[in-house]
Amino acid sequence: MGRKVRLVAVITGLALVASVAASAAFGAHRADPGVTSTTITIGGTFPLTGVASLYKTIPAAEGAYFAYINAKGGVNHRKIDFKVLDDAYNPAQTVPLTQQLVEQTGIFADFGSLGTAPNLSIWKYLNQKKVPQVLIATGDSYWGFSAKKYPWTIGYQPDYPGEGKVYGKYIATNSPNAKIGVLYQNDAFGKNYFAGLRVGLGARKSQIVASQSYDPTQTSLVQQILALKSAGADTLVIFALPSQAITALVTATKVGWSPTTFLGNVSANPIFLRIAAQNGANVDGVISTAYLDSVSSAAQANLPGVKLTKSIIGTYAPPLMASVNAGDGNVIYGLSAAWTFVYALQHAGKTPTRAGLMKALHSMTNVKDPFTYPGISLNTSATDNFPIEQEILIKWGGGAKGDWTPFGTLYNHVR
């Protein structure tokens, strides 16, 4: 080989090495934000303080589940780094905090952020940025029905209008002469629930004799409860945050009103009912819905999801064990949402992309989440943006030391 030929070969070899190096660098540069060879950074906003702070055990439980997964090697050898910021259930705080997570922290996905109004405030922004807004902790139907316009958003729990329909159908069938009073939060959260109730009642929606709204910052509901009682209502339907739901139950008893009561699932945590009872409320007979295992029900103590809950929390978040032992449904909710996220991440490709995550979340067929109520599965598709569409009715008994008891059969296609 002549000198000129050898020189050409060397130059060609160097060019090839440079090309491979450039390709590798380009590939690394093209990795979606939040993804490195060892970590996947996600984040969300939650009310750690403020009017909805009773939900703060949700992100704590989610963090425990991610710690459990990380201890097992993570997902495809990547550890999940979960950033939690406190927006106090205030959309005015949600917006800048979410921008911080996206533009400064560089999260891969906005996971589990809580609240209807907070999520509505960042819905358009995250979709414009093509940042997954996934498994958010709000049951409004927006997330399901707007998938075409907002393809980067997906909810998790059964939607509020669907749940409201369940109560409406039950009342229409079992209490056809009911005189209904409705207490609801004066925003999209409460109004969506209320709309579903009216649809479920059908021709009997005229039996709603009164409705009263409240502002999320209100601490007294005496005026609303007295107005509903004075209207002659013998059935009370509560679509409220935990603090106001507890207040409503206590106030109704103190003013001498004992209506048949229905309570939205978001405030049906056993801890909340026990708090209400301890403060004088008559909670026996209250009806709600469930779609998750109960960590405090003796009948469900041996379910795999309940055992796994106690194992994970006991190991990775011991301070939460007091909440588990008290029956805090928010803990098992957090574990369930985190389980679903990890499931999707495992199916999003060896090196996950945001698009791959969304595809995985829209490709769930009869997926069995260990934390959901027996018989309930996760199902989605390219045209179905509602992961959970099943619920069971539950009734409270036993006062301050009581618990929920499921009754009837599973409601399917709840939306």
Image (spheres, rainbow, N blue to C red):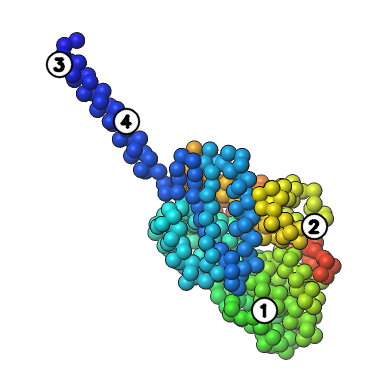
Q: Type of residue at label 1?
A: Val
Q: CA distance from mark 2 to mark 1?
A: 29 Å
The reply to whether callout 2 and callout 3 are in contact (CB within 8 Å) is no
Residue name at image x 64 percent, y 80 percent: 219
Mark sitting earlier along the chain (1/3): 3
Secondary structure of the residue carrying numbered label 3: helix
Q: CA distance from mark 4 to mark 2?
A: 59 Å
Q: CA distance from mark 3 to mark 4?
A: 24 Å
Tag on residue 18? Answer: none
Vertical arrangement, residue 195 with respect to residue 141, above or below: below
Mark sitting earlier along the chain (4/1): 4
Q: Which residue is mark 4?
A: 20
**How many other residues sit within 10 Å of disc 1, few (<14), some (14-19) or many (≥20)?**
many
Q: Type of residue at label 2?
A: Ser
Q: Which residue is mark 3?
A: 4
Q: Position of residue 361 (x, y in %)?
A: 54, 49
Q: CA distance from mark 1 to mark 3?
A: 90 Å
Which mark lies nearer to you, 2 or 1?
2
Q: Which residue is mark 1?
A: 182
Judge left or right: residue 123 versus residue 305: left
Residue name at image x 46 percent, y 64 percent: 97
Report the front residue among 23 and 143.
Answer: 23
Judge left or right: residue 382 versus residue 280: left
Q: Which residue is mark 2?
A: 297
Secondary structure of the residue carrying numbered label 2: loop
Residue name at image x 69 percent, y 48 percent: 315
Q: Type of residue at label 4?
A: Val
